[in-house]
């Protein structure tokens, strides 16, 4: 019994230790997600917004931004190691597997990581780019839960409101 209690205690502390060590956490099996933050002047306006589960790629979910940017779709997808380990990970780009990309995360998690994204794809990690769950609204569109909305800056809240208004029209 003592050994069993020790194993249980160890199992309970492992996730906490992983989080404390900066372990990457995936968004989970969500149908709607919100991308917020991103300090890069060019990439930020492209990737920020709400996304809906649209497809599957290499055994993982792929998301499409609910609005286009400069007449381009914005996709969030996983690419496996078939083209080499340096291509493996999660990507933002206008099409799945395309040559043009905006942001990258090297994790092999089965769902997109919440943080730690490189912006641009070959640049440093941007701690402000965060993925979160978004909830569907009646009549279409999505909304960010109140607890997550409090984390948004005033500018991000303004952009979120503008996107929601556009979706309602």
Image (spheres, grey):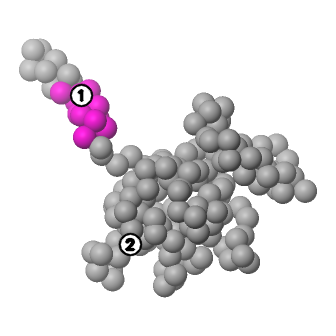
Please give the name of the residue rendered at 82% of the width and 43% of the height, measured from the top-left corner.
138
Under circle 1, the secondary element is: helix
Image quadrant holding the C terminus, namely: bottom right
> Does the magenta portion include 12?
yes
Quadrant of the rendered image containing residue 143: top right
Please give the name of the residue rendered at 56% of the width and 51% of the height, measured from the top-left corner.
37
> Does the magenta portion include 136?
no
Residue for badge 1: 13
Comparing 37 with 25, the one in front is 37
- Horizontally, residue 53 falls left or right of residue 4, namely right
What segment carries the magenta color? Answer: 10-21
- Residue 135 visible? The answer is no
Please give the name of the residue rendered at 50% of the width and 76% of the height, measured from the top-left corner.
101
Comparing 144 with 153, the one in front is 153
Residue for badge 2: 122
Q: Which mark is residue 101?
A: none
Quadrant of the rendered image containing residue 51: bottom right
How far apart are the two marked residues, 2 and 1, measured between alpha carbons?
34 Å
Image quadrant holding the N terminus, namely: top left
- Residue with the most extreme top position: 1
Q: Position of residue 31 (x, y in %)?
A: 61, 52
Q: Position of residue 110 (x, y in %)?
A: 40, 57
Circle 2 residues within 10 Å: few <14, some 14–19, many ≥20? few
Under circle 2, the secondary element is: loop
Q: Earlier in the sequence, mark 2 or mark 1?
A: 1
- Horizontally, residue 71 falls left or right of residue 13, namely right
Residue 39, placed above or below residue 157: below
Q: Position of residue 29 (x, y in %)?
A: 51, 49
- Residue with the most extreme left position: 3
Q: Nearer the viewer, mark 2 or mark 1?
A: 2
Circle 1 residues within 10 Å: few <14, some 14–19, many ≥20? few
Comparing 36 with 4, the one in front is 36
């Amino acid at each position: 019994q003592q050994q069993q209690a020790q194993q249980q205690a160890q199992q309970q502390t492992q996730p906490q230790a992983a989080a404390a060590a900066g372990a990457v956490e995936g968004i989970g099996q969500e149908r709607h997600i919100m991308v917020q933050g991103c300090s890069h002047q060019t990439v930020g306006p492209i990737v920020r917004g709400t996304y809906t589960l649209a497809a599957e790629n290499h055994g993982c979910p792929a998301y499409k931004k609910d609005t286009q940017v400069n007449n381009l779709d914005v996709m969030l997808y996983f690419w496996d190691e078939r083209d080499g380990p340096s291509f493996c990970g999660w990507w933002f780009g206008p099409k799945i597997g395309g040559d043009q990309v905006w942001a990258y995360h090297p994790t092999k998690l089965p769902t997109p990581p919440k943080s730690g994204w490189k912006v641009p794809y070959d640049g440093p990690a941007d701690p402000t780019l965060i993925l979160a769950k978004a909830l569907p609204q009646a009549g279409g569109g999505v909304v960010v839960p109140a607890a997550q909305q409090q984390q948004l800056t005033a500018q991000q809240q303004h952009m979120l409101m503008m996107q929601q208004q556009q979706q309602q029209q």
